Image: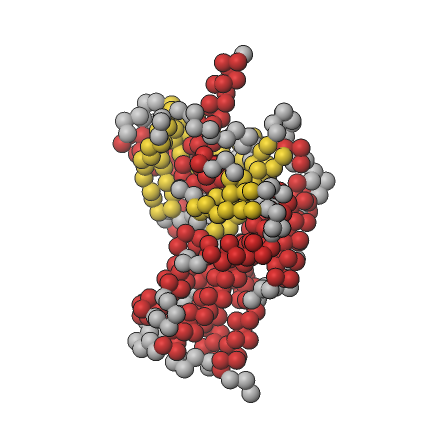
Amino acid sequence: MASELEQMDAILDKFVLDDDTLFKVSSLLLQQMERGLSAEHNSIATVKMFPTYVTSFPNGKETGRFLALDLGGSNFRVLTIEMQTDVKIAGNIYSIPEEIMKGPGNKLFDFIVNCLEKLLLDVDQIKDTLPLGFTFSFPCVQHSLTSATLVFWTKGFECSGVEGRDVVQLLNDAIQRSGKISVEVIAFVNDTTGTLTTCAYKDENCKVGLIVGTGCNACYVEDTKNIHTLQPGYEDREKMIVNTEWGAFGDDGCLDFLRTKFDKEIDKESCNKGKQVFEKMISGMYMGEIVRKVLVEFDEKGLIPQRLPNRIREQGSFKSKYVSHIEEDGEGLYPKTKSVLWKLGFIETPEEECEILKRVCRRVSTRAAHLVSAAVATLLNKMQRPETTIGVDGSVYRYHPFFKQIMEEKIADLTDPKYKFKLMLSEDGSGRGAAFVAAAAVREKREKDRKL
Ligand code: BGC
């Protein structure tokens, strides 16, 4: 009979992905990416590789005042961005009430416009028509820089009447309904695009934007000639950002060979069953819940000396941020682990339990970092650039104590050594990114008009 420790290890070993497995993940992902870029096979691709129509990048010569909306997680932000010799940002952040996240779509857009109105009143610009960049971080088919149809919601959003509709139109409709403000939507972007753009402002080698936060996704700069799903009229553009939407990788079952029973349960209990399979193994929306499920399994099998408090049986009770807190504790030390255990209702916190919890967190977060690394390596090997900077944002990447380090090591293991890379933390890409894209589009138009 295997000891308790061996039994726990056998469960945790399912989270270990060796390099052969990660190479396999990478080659499956590449296959999906190629399908996504092809006109013929896009319909069967899980990774849709949406063209973003972002072809102009900020070059520091942008000026003016812009508005930005940032919707993509449980918080929503409205910002004003003043670009002169430097960039000044002001704005407000709102948490989105559950009834708005899951209610009718027009209520969501009315809520957004209401927040925008308040900001314009605060900055005394309610009467002006300002250019606006809209970051909307969900999978959308874009038709141009200012038109995008939501394919499906992710990350817990379920507003009715939005899937299959043009979200810029829905925003404009809500502005009309309000009748109090006037804005011009210049750019619609995903948070990955915003991240890439803001990092590219500082580092021209930045050609990939990555988010590891509530959700997980990446975009990159592609030669326009390789994108076969473009609307006509962009033939003269050399490069364009492509939003991979790799969160949906695995939705056809191709990753089932590595998914654990916990991943499958999480999917079953989610509001978007069968969707975002890759994202569900990585992002902050799910990481804590995976850890919780493993702990419950240990408990049910009688592998932990102390019975777990009931709180742990509640779905969502183990927050993803706890994983980062716990892993901050050094070798053999448990102050943060203990404080998490207290929050969860443990009265006694012997070191043995603390160590078990830490090991579960480490396995789950390392698997997430390895899967993201395999996906980043796929892009780097595909792009074949001697040097690439990857702009990164998102709570998991930002706050986990070793996520960056694990990624650096694993990307290097999985990427051809000819292609050097650097990870760069973005400064609020999803907020200011949309304004940057809008500003670059305005500048380019001005330059063109001047030439004519
Ligand atoms: C969405 C992406 C987004 C990512 C990170 C995913 O759920 O589908 O559009 O970029 O989350 O926010």
Q: Quadrant of residue 2?
A: bottom right
**Above/below status of 20 relative to 272:** below
Residue 163 in the image: x percent, y percent? 54, 42
Residue 161 in the image: x percent, y percent? 50, 42
Work out which quarter of the rendered image holds the C terminus and state it. Answer: top right
Residue displayed at 43% across by 25% down: 61
Q: Residue furthest top?
A: 452
Res. 296 in view? yes
Q: Residue furthest front?
A: 418
Residue 118 in the image: x percent, y percent? 30, 34
Res. 172 in view? no
Q: Residue furthest right?
A: 40
Residue displayed at 60% across by 41% down: 385
Residue displayed at 31% across by 25% down: 125
Q: Quadrant of residue 331?
A: bottom left
Q: Quadrant of residue 120?
A: top left
Count of labels shown?
Answer: 0
**Above/below status of 398 relative to 58:** below
